[in-house]
Amino acid sequence: MENHKNKSMALKQLLVVFLLITQFSFAQNSNGGGEANPDLKTNEQALKRFQDNRFGMFIHWGPVTLRGTEISWSRGKEVAIDEYDNLYKEFNPVLFNANDWVKTAKDAGMKYIVLTARHHDGFSLWDSKFTDYDMKNTPYGKGVLKELAAACKEQNIDFGLYYTICDWHHQDYPVVYPDKDYKFHIEKDITDPATKEKMDRYITYMKNQLKELIEDYNPTLFWFDGEWEWAWTHEMGMDLYAYLRGLNDNLLINNRIDKGREGMAGTTKSYKYAGDYATPEQEIGKYDVTNAWESCITIANQWAWKANDQLKPTKQCIQTLVQTAGGGGNLLLNVGPMADGRIEQRQIDRLKEIGTWLDLYGEAIYGTRGGPFLPTETIVSTHKNDKIYVHLLKNPEGNLEVSLPKGYKVKKCYFLNQTDFLTFELKKGKLRISLPETLPNANVSVLVLEMNKSTEGMEPI
Ligand code: FHN
């Protein structure tokens, strides 16, 4: 009888373990190559570095800055198609200085840069062997990626490239946008032989360009975009992911290389789709400490430069940063350099204000992971080793109360960068911290809870 009992207990335990494993694997969103490449997993080392970086600079730039309208989307609207497609003949950013851009990112506390190498308007910001619609054929006469990659390397900033799948300029890309009604003009189904032939040629063009970008500029990541149009399929996305990882196994690639993104929320529908991290856009991603994600948000209203575009207040930028980190994600904050190659001073100044905050509180952002306290209107939290960082988005007016997971005790509690300890009490799993009337930082103040053991693996609470 005893023997039978032991056997059934062992079976039950085995079942629980099996269910946990399957549940976790299905819970996985993007995990590399997607269902066609089940063994091609995300490069964990590259992902760890990316997540440790936490904060990057997105740069949308191109000849359209001569008009100050939105990159690609103003083509055929505010700027006539023919005029837009010939702007490159005037594009001469003589004041472009890669070291200045990288220093601006560094002074902001940003750890990586992602530049639009080619946006939907099809213009290539480098000297490409595969098109004449590129920087070599502008009055400037040369690409900018070489200098930018070198400046990033010199200043220890990771170098990433944005690359679009949809190209409304390229003769082989089968979707015409905008057509006369400003809609996506759908020529024929992708299975139509002539359309398929064009798309095959276009995919070869993309693979050739991506290969030259890897070989000549060695980006740490590709930020794909423009996957939403009918011409691009799930199979093409998984094939392109495998192709790129075959060229450089250390590459990190976002989830917009495939069709798994759920709109602007950016999360990936399921593990079946290729991509290494999710990409919420113009919003703070939902709390997710299982799957990597990064919110891309503009510092102004437009992605590309616009005269007198309204900048987001410094406090909003800093609170957005802590809310993405507290949710388990990265923030890719976008700037738009001007046609002469400079980033405008007021954007530089705004970024520097964020950097000043990070000089004080960067310990609570870099290398941390989200949680364990779930975000509220008042707090978000991050953790690293034996510390929990509580970011106060507003003054809770008196005591702050949070629940503590079982088995954890607080040894010390204090504001980051301050010496005097705060009083707290722990009753029935509730931690209550007495806070001063005035918080130390007008943007976000950070409390440190030094715990009795490592916070790794703490369940969200
Ligand atoms: O159409 C683009 C847009 O111009 C911009 O590049 C953003 C950045 O993520 N992505 C697309 C819109 O979702």
Image (spheres, rainbow, N blue to C red):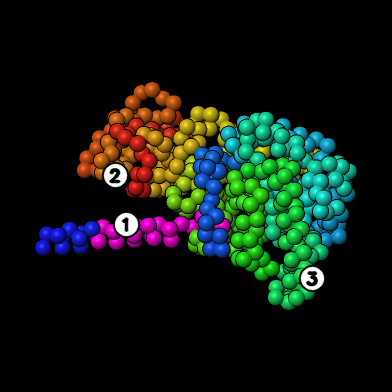
Q: Name the residue under label 2.
A: 405
> Relative to 88, is 196 on the left or the right?
left
Instruction: Indicate left or right for 429 with 31 as reference.
Output: left
Q: How far apart are marks 3 and 2 (CA)?
A: 60 Å
Can you tell which quarter of the image residue 21 is in? bottom left
Helix, strand or loop: magenta stretch: helix
Whole-angstrom CA distance, mark 3 to mark 1, is 58 Å
Quadrant assignment, res 406: top left
User: Considering only vertical position in the picture, is 229 above or below 370?
Assistant: below
Q: Nearer the viewer, mark 2 or mark 1?
A: 1
Q: Give the range drawn in magenta.
A: 11-33
Q: Where is residue 19 in the image (x, y as percent from the top left)?
A: 34, 61
- Residue corresponding to mark 1: 17
Tell me which amino acid carries mark 2.
Answer: Pro
Q: In this view, does 112 lie above or below 41?
A: above
Which one is closest to the eye, mark 3 or mark 2? 2
Q: Where is residue 315 in the image (x, y as percent from the top left)?
A: 54, 39
Relative to the observer, which residue lies in front, 248 or 26? 248
Name of the residue lying farthest toward the top: 419
Q: Is mark 2 on a helix, strand or loop?
A: loop
Give the mark nearest the N terminus, 2 or 1.
1
Residue that label 3 marks: 180
Tell me the residue at 46%/35% (across/down). 364
Residue 21 on the magenta segment = yes
The answer to whether residue 375 is visible is: yes
